Every structure is written in structure tokens, then in C-alpha cells.
Image (cartoon, grey):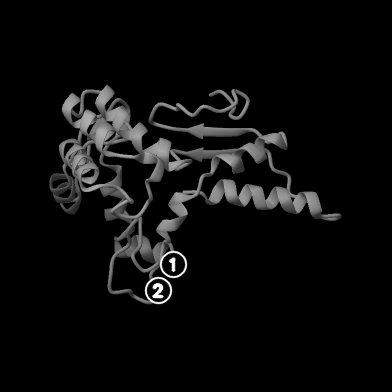
Amino acid sequence: WHYIPQLADVLLTHNKKSKGFKFNIKGVAIGNPLLKLDRDVPATFEYFWSHGMISDEIFLAINKGCDFEDYTFNNPHNESKSCNDAIAEANGIVGNYVNNYDVILDVCYPSIVMQELRLRKYVTKISVGVDVCMTYERFFYFNLPEVQHALHANRTHLPYGWSMCSDVLDYSGKDGNINILPLLQRIVEQKIPVWVFRYVTFSYFISDNLFKPM
């Protein structure tokens, strides 16, 4: 979530203090990052509502029941039951198959695509030039024994399959609460361009010079 800006900040701090080797940082690019929870979270539901994915009633219930100033990353997010219920209802309506990053894309049903992959068929689910089944194809591909052998992976024959996110590593949910905007401000002040790729409306009230235009 935050490690790219944090790493860039550490490297720039090193450059300031170092009398020898300095890192040559050309720029920082981050994709759909968590920057500031009290803006990121409501922006998601504003996006759903503006695209007709959730009703006016649910959107109003979220706005009325949630105090995003105190929102925390870990469940129950330091929010009221009415807030969490409204958010759960919104997420339930959007569902698991809609791509939150591009809601106009077609959907990919995992049971169908996994069956096609097991039968050694090509999955031809292309929507607006995007392979909407890539997540499932990637999961299937990287768990093939011949692929793992070619990549010299899973040499110890782990009892579980490869996946994008692992429960083995202990990810700290507290990191999600960090406001990353001051870090980006420090990076830009050192004349390092920052590119932010986002799928929701970017409505932070910050200097126009903070981010490079796309």
C-alpha cells in the first residue's frame, strides 16, 4: 500500500545525508494506492453511486452513518454498526465479479474459466481490450507443476498453492491507516515527479503542483 513512497522517501533522505553514493531517482509511480483513508474509502462509494451501481438510499445511508474522519483499516473500522451494515450492503450489491477498477468491463465467472483452463482451452473473455479473466488464468498458470519447475519455485513442495496474497506473511493492517500525502509532498518538494494511477475520482484538496498530470 505505502511501501513505494516510503522507500522513495528513505532513499531521498539517504541522498541528503550521504557524502558518497546517491540514488538516482527519476520518479515515483504508484497504482491505485491508499493515500488517506478518510478520502479513499468514501471515494470508492461515491464512484459506485455515480456509476449507478448502488442506490441513492444506500449511498445516503453510508454518508449519514459513517464518520470517515475516524475510519481505520482493520474491521470494524472504528465505525458504527449502521455504517458497517450500509457498507456491507453496498459491497454485496456490487458483488465479487464486477471489476471495481473498471466497472464497464464484462465479468468473468471463476467456475467457468477454471473448467476451461482444466480442459486446456483458451479463455477468450476479452472486454474493451482487457482480459477480464487474467486473475484466474494467473492463479492456474503459476500453480502448474511444470511452470513452478521452470521458475525454480516451490522447491520444498509446500502443501498449499500459490496465490497473489498470502496468509503466511503477517501483514499489519495498521499500515493502512498511515496518511501518505505528507510523504508525497516531501518527494515532490525535492523535484521528483510523482505519477498516481487511480480508478476513482481524485478529489484531494492539495496543491496543483503535487502530482504530475497524466
Q: Which image quadrant is residue 147 in? A: bottom left
Please give the residue where the numbered disc 2 appears in the rendered image.
155
**Secondary structure state at the residue bearing disc 2:** loop
Per the model, the C-alpha gap separating discs 2 and 1 is 7 Å
Res. 39 image quadrant? top left
Q: Is residue 179 left or right of residue 172?
A: right
Instruction: Please tell me which residue lies in front, 102 or 156.
Output: 102
| Residue 122 shows up from this direction | no
Q: Relative to 6, say whether 125 is above or below.
A: above
List the residue tagged with mark 1. 152
Asked if residue 145 is positioned above or below residue 192 in the image, the reply reads below
Would residue 191 be seen by someone viewing this image from the given angle?
A: yes
Residue at left offset 33%, top offset 65%: 167
Residue 148 in the image: state x and y as whole percent: 37, 64
186 sits left or right of 153 in the view: right
The kind of residue on which mark 1 rests is His
